[in-house]
Image (cartoon, coloured by chain):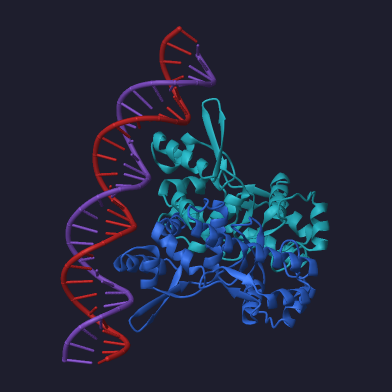
Chain colours: A blue, B cyan, C purple, D red
Amino acid sequence: MAVMEALARLLADRTRAAFCGALLDGRAWTAHELATHAGVAPSTASEHLTRLVEGGLLVEHRQGRHRYVALAGPHVAELLEAMTAFAGPAPAPRTLRAASASEAMARGRTCYDHLAGRLGITLKTGLLELGVVTTDLAVTEPGIVWLKELGFEPSSRQLSRACLDWTERVPHLAGAAGAHLCRTFLDRGWVKRIGTTRAVTLTPAGDAGWRDLGLL
Amino acid sequence: MAVMEALARLLADRTRAAFCGALLDGRAWTAHELATHAGVAPSTASEHLTRLVEGGLLVEHRQGRHRYVALAGPHVAELLEAMTAFAGPAPAPRTLRAASASEAMARGRTCYDHLAGRLGITLKTGLLELGVVTTDLAVTEPGIVWLKELGFEPSSRQLSRACLDWTERVPHLAGAAGAHLCRTFLDRGWVKRIGTTRAVTLTPAGDAGWRDLGLL
DNA sequence: GGGACACTTCGGCCGGCACCGAAGCGTGCG
DNA sequence: CGCACGCTTCGGTGCCGGCCGAAGTGTCCC
């Protein structure tokens, strides 16, 4: 249990948790951006980042005078989402702005590299009705063919994986298949980021595309 | 991320982590037993238990002057194992006794309600070859029939679930199916606990039984 | 080359929390 | 009925760790 405790200790801090939350958008952030985001001094942020990198949660990429950090991989995102989902629903937001942002996230968002929120659930439901996945979110044989038609190339990464949604409390599709679909939809302009946040929305083109595929 | 942080904070303590580790055997422990196990005063243990119960990780059951606590369910065990697996291999044990105990756990153990360790991997491999589960550990149609012959009754609980093994670094079978198999093997005397620990071993009867089923 | 900037290291401060022992409460047993 | 036992509550103590600012290093740009 000593190793589990060390991991928990790493996440049991307001500032480090805020860093991880920000990095869940899947992008790389600079140390300065994260410091501002969390409201701490650059020196404080620097120390936290070192600890998170040493703990294997983050990877860093030095470029000139910048230190870019990102989640070390999908497995980190999955861990964070699993813990968030376990911990239960977040307390209700206090301000109107926060409530609106929270509602946008609940409607649809990326979870590192795949779709989550109600949009993720809609996708999952569609895939289920098409027979691409089973109720346990395992990809079926015909499902693999279906995915390949969307340009999917199987890799060594686990094909599908259930990721418990922290707003909907229902598992949604993660893993290689979930990541590929998310990337494809973003590339095609079917799903679009709202501003620079993790929140996303289905565009009119996306609505049409999903209907074409039989997802809606 | 505030909720995730609160959960992490709960696990980020030596004593509370020790409690959770002990409770991973799936039994209910008294406050006194846990205090002794972790080497703290009863008063300290009492406070920790209250926090763990309030955090939803443990459930308690008052009986006379005893306070029994247990993990709140399989989802807690799965979370703990996931975090342990993520954190990587435990540091090498220092003493001979610890090394021997650690080796016994690595050979085979229960993970709350299912089998883990090399024995868990052997089981998974056998189930895979029999076509009961897919490589993603989803139960197949014939697999459900196979399980029913072993007395399995489907319930609302997720049928199967991958649980990353912290000694073997490979997913093994958890979920309702994994729990049923573990219970069945223990009932039949095919798998036996070593002393009162989580470590288990395959008995000669179990070896024969598994061969009969085609698992070996 | 000089100045702005991103980041790091170090020292010191401060708050939170894990811990214990003492005292109190309820239960069970002789 | 009284004592033993398990647990809880409450003060008090001590340490760990998060925080900042100041000073230092390396990078970029003018």
The structure residue drawn at horizontal position 48% and vertical position 45%, both measured from the top left corner, is B19
Q: Looking at the picture, how far across and down is residue B100, in whole percent?
A: 49, 54
Q: Is A126 above or below relative to B178?
A: below
The structure residue drawn at horizontal position 37% and vertical position 77%, both measured from the top left corner, is A67
Q: Is B119 above or below relative to B34?
A: below
Q: Quadrant of residue B125?
A: bottom right
Nearest the viewer among B169 and A29 is A29
- Quarter of the image with the C terminus of chain A is bottom right
Q: Looking at the picture, how far across and down is residue B90, in whole percent?
A: 46, 60
Residue D11 appears left or right of A83: left
Q: Looking at the picture, how far across and down is residue B80, in whole percent?
A: 54, 54
Q: Looking at the picture, how far across and down is residue A106, in whole percent?
A: 60, 61
The structure residue drawn at horizontal position 71% and vertical position 73%, both measured from the top left corner, is A207
Nearest the viewer among A203 and D22 is A203
Q: Quadrant of residue D4?
A: top left
Q: Residue A164: in sight, yes or no? A: yes
Residue B173 appears left or right of A58: right
Number of residue marks: 0
- Furthest toward the front, the residue is A96
Residue D29 appears left or right of B151: left
The structure residue drawn at horizontal position 49% and vertical position 75%, both measured from the top left corner, is A27
Nearest the viewer among A214 and B172 is A214
Nearest the viewer among A75 and B38 is A75
Q: Residue B164: in sight, yes or no? A: no
